[in-house]
Image: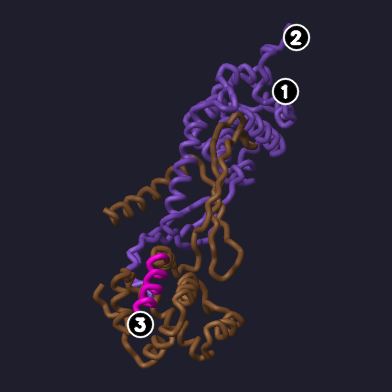
Amino acid sequence: MSIIQVKGSGKSVAPDRTPFFGVRVPKEIKSMIKPISKIEQDLFRKLLKLLVAALEGNEIEYDDIKRLESESLSEETIVIIYAGFMTLLKSALKHTSLKQEMFVEDLHELQIPEIFHNDLSSVVYGSRRPKIDNFSNEQRPRMTRLDNLKWRVDVAISTSVLNRVLEPSIQMEMTLSDGTIQSFEVPISQFHKLRYNIAFILKEMEDLEKRSILKIKD
Amino acid sequence: MAALMFTNTPSIQKAVSLINNLDNSKVSLLLSRILSKLYVSESRPFSEEEESKLQGALDVSGDDLGLILETLEFFVQQAAYHSAKPQVLASQLKGLEINEDKVDCIVEVWSNGAYEVINRLKSKGLAPKVLEDINWRLNLQLAQSSKVKLKAPNTLIELALKSEDSEQKERIRLDFSHEELYEFYQQLETIQKQLDTLFK
């Protein structure tokens, strides 16, 4: 098998690597390239602050954008740049193992002015990253979760049909993430089954995280 | 167990004399059925049709049959309530002047079925919903719209609840990440520790 390397003229990206934004430059990024040459670092930083806030899950208002408008910079241009950097950052944040040099290399490739590189890197590789990742994780579609579990253990002493029972039973009250509350009894035999199953799944999960059964490479 | 289970009332005396006249094998069969249906449902141990057939087979009147069945049921209800040992039941039945061979029949049926019946009654709860079944599925999340190349295990757990008022089982479906599942497990462990102290 032979590998043919194609080197395009002026392209600095190695052919064996896909840039973080994908094979094609997204149109949001494309449309901002021209306008960004016009903006100052100061304004860029203000814009970046909004972008990071949005990525961390905060609501961005129309007024926040409107405030950045000036005589030389129309609201429309700001929105284009905002959308462009949003797409750029989201594409970079998608990757869990994108190296910083590669990221910067791709920024060059996109012709993003060098004065912005450090600030962009500090979003992707800086201390805000865990918070951004956290928010994007919370956004994944999920089934109902267990929000709260209350329980109690009872020992029945006697019943209408049995003088001495002395049999424990468990009452559980589960509050689910959709707001419903379910109360039910767990007989001892079922409790052992539940505990065994949960322990079994946990073990499987740990094995899954240790072994790379699916040959997923970072 | 010293508790007095039976009082010799006129109606029991009448029932005893009727029972004493029955075949041993028939007493055993009647009692086995009564024991197996004890508190199982609200219905009686024998259907109406069966009862009319029994009248012929045992050669007794409808009222007498009713008395025999109720009395035999009462014997095992009391035996179950006190978790009576066979010899205790035997001596108490003898006190009611039941013939020795009938006492042996009743005690034998009770000894054979007692363990199962008492266990069944022990587990008889009054809760409207009871956990009956657990199903699960383990997944490995590889990507999501905002992330690629993930390796995040998650599990879906389904708890099936038997509900008193409906035939259909209610199902609770829960989504757990590794961390969340571990937290849940810790709570189950706490419950287990409480149970362990009970049986020390």
Q: Quadrant of residue A6?
A: top right
Give the brown chain's letter: B
User: Along the line of sight, which residue is nearer the eye, A125 or B193?
Assistant: B193
**Secondary structure type for disc 1:** loop
Q: Does residue B105 belong to the magenta stretch?
A: yes
Q: Is residue B133 left or right of residue B143?
A: left
Label 3 neighbour load within 10 Å: few <14, some 14-19, many 20+: many
Q: Which residues are magenta?
A: B100-112
Residue A169 higher or lower than A204, as above or below: below
Q: Which residue is mark 1?
A: A23
CA separation in Å, label 2 and label 3: 105 Å
Cβ atoms at labels 2 and 3 below 8 Å apart: no
Q: Position of residue B107 (x, y in %)?
A: 37, 72
Chain label for disc 3: B
Q: Position of residue A28 (x, y in %)?
A: 72, 32
Give the purple chain's letter: A
Residue located at (72% from left, 23% from top): A23
Q: Position of residue A209 (x, y in %)?
A: 50, 31
Q: Which mark is residue A6?
A: 2
Q: Which mark is residue B98?
A: 3
